[in-house]
Amino acid sequence: MIDLSIDGGIATISFHVADRPMNVLNDGSIAAFEAAARKVMTDPAIKGAIITSSRPEFVVGADLETLRGITDPAKAMAVSGRLSYLFREIEKSGKPFVAAINGSALGGGYEICLACHYRIAADNPRTQIGLPEVTLGLLPGAGGTQRLPRMIGLKNALPMLIDGRKIGVGKAKELGMVDEVVPAGELMSRARQWLGVEGAANVVKPWDKKGFRLPGGNVQSPPSWQLFMGAAAALRGKTAGIYPAPAAIMESVYDGCHVDIDAGLKIENRQFARLAVSPEAQNMIRTLFFAIGDANKLVGRPAGVAAQTYRKIGVLGAGMMGAGIAHVAAEAGLEVVLIDQTKAAAEKGKGYSASLLDKQVKQGRLSPDKRDAILGRITPTETYDLLGDADIVIEAVFEDRVVKEQVTRAAEKRLPATALFASNTSTLPITGLAETSQRPANFVGLHFFSPVDRMPLVEVIRGRKTSEETIARAMDFVKAIRKTPIVVNDGRAFYTSRVFGTYVYEGMALLNDGVNPSLIERAGTNAGMPVGPLALMDEISLELMHKVMRQTEADLGSAYRPQPQDPVLVKMVEGLGRLGRKSDGGFYDYATDGSKRLWPELATHFPRLREQPSLEEVKKRLMYIQSIEASRCLEEKIVNARDADVGSILGWGFPAALGGVVSQVDTIGIARFVAECDQLAQLYGARFMPPQNLRDRAARGETLRAA
């Protein structure tokens, strides 16, 4: 895990954690690093040390297995304290240590660099430097909240810590997070040179010298007071009060920088332990790191199917979704045939990709040559003639069964027999759509999310006749275009649309019940959702959801049961012509400058209750209904618990602090959740009745995650 070599009195400590995909800090690597560092500190023949890596990355942080499921704060303190105390020994050792940063140094990896007396980075465009622990509900627990402000000042350090920013070596040099940037081939020689020439004179850190003051002003200075006051005010809006890590980071910096570094490290250690055992951190570690990691590794991929590589795809429909799919496929290096009814419509779809790429070029993130290469891989056309050697075709036309059937037949006439056919439907059952296909075993659902270029999730939908080979190959495709797949079984609205829909539908039900729309919207965002349900409904389009409602009525006939949101959809669309944002207004009015306000006439058409419910009651209705529907999906075997959580976070922005729609139940406590849902059902209707699997698990004391 650590290679130690000594040459001319200079030790090189090189990370090489061979049993992990990348260099991480775990029990084994920490023990090996500690032994090597103590050898340097105690051997009189060693004058100083270079810390580097023999792998492409430096060190990318802690192995989160050491924190997964941890419940004892004392154990959490010991985990971070071990490194924190070792790093303090290194910087006080009297021997110079220099970090030769050859690749990404993140989290605990960058904290190693902070403990060194000098930091030199190779000029590598792929290198990322930062302390991103906040993104997993944690804080840097090995000195990051104490050393970084003392090194680059509070103004520069706080955003890096609170936002978990990862930056390139150029920006890191500008901020003072690294001292030098040199060509990669000169990294080790420059590190040796620094040790030999300057190292001995720089073995005392600035904060260990008498009279030290933080760059830019100490905590008590007026600029720092303003900084903390502004950050505290902004924090509530960013975290909705459900993410404790940013506030803990701010407290750690504020309290720790009032005192000497050793006392500050103890403050940091206690804050780290408090966060590590919190439900929020455990939820985020489990879902954001492990569950999403498993999904990206295709852990659920059917076994025994050879991996497929993709060269060429067809996309049917050059509207917003089809154009987005074409864009991400071309970015991933695939040839794309983009088909629409007219050549002009197909060209317009390609233009969407051009606009995205031009923006990247303007920002300096992409070269004109690479832009042209990506665009060159998209061929717009009005015919199906170029599909003869396509590996997969993705249908992304209107949510109209007749139109989908027409393009399916037309495309299959040109496709090779082995090609997959995928529908990007968000609601129509795949089994029904596949009845048109001459090869139903090769027919699969691939539900993308809008905007495709930014949304990471793809729902892979298994129809009744879809083969396991097709599922495996579809997952390979999703990975090839750098998206995260979840696999779900067929059913009306599948999983994501079905569960996500309950959020916006409950928002409309609340409106119909007489709840103030401002309260509805505030409850949604205060619960941690990205936007309120009414604003989200406007973005989706009331017209679209109205069509889905009417289509469902037609499909189910006498079996259709009216839903609480139906009267709102009918009144808004059929009665008032308020169709959503794209049609100049729905629940909101929209100004030309992009601003919006709730439509003042809502109160006229949806009279308000004299006595409004509490914010907590509205939040509970909006959030619980999602987990109830998710648990029904588990009971019906539409999706497994892991993919349900992943899909909710990546698909519609369910709060990561709750771990996902399934984990929310376990965070609340399954018995308590069932009891509170029964109360909601008595007040607001049977849609809040917990399904039997929830009751059974509550009775047995099991978690829903194990379903």
Image (cartoon, helix red, strand yellow):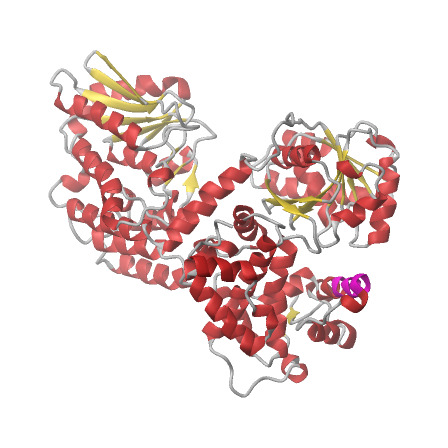
Which quadrant of the figure has residue 343?
top right
Left/right placement of residue 594 relative to residue 238 reads: right
Q: Residue at x 63, y 82 (%)?
A: 603
Q: Position of residue 66 (x, y in %)?
A: 33, 39
Q: Position of residue 673 (x, y in %)?
A: 46, 65
Farthest residue in the bottom direction?
Answer: 610
Closest to the observer, 593 or 484:
484
Closest to the observer, 203 or 530:
530
Left/right placement of residue 605 relative to residue 343 reads: left
Asked if the magenta segment contains residue 242, the reply would be no
Q: Is residue 534 above or below residue 450?
A: below
Closest to the observer, 550 or 596:
550
The answer to whether residue 242 of the structure is visible from this angle is yes
Which quadrant of the figure has residue 351?
top right
Q: Is residue 694 above or below residue 96?
A: below
| Count of numbered circles in the view | 0
Farthest residue in the top direction?
Answer: 8
The answer to whether residue 535 of the structure is visible from this angle is no
Quadrant of the drawing holding the N terminus: top left
Q: Main secondary structure of the magenta part?
A: helix
Q: Position of residue 524 (x, y in %)?
A: 52, 66
Left/right placement of residue 101 relative to residue 433 reads: left
Closest to the observer, 209 or 510:
510
Q: Which residues are magenta?
A: 547-556
Q: Position of residue 652 (x, y in %)?
A: 58, 55
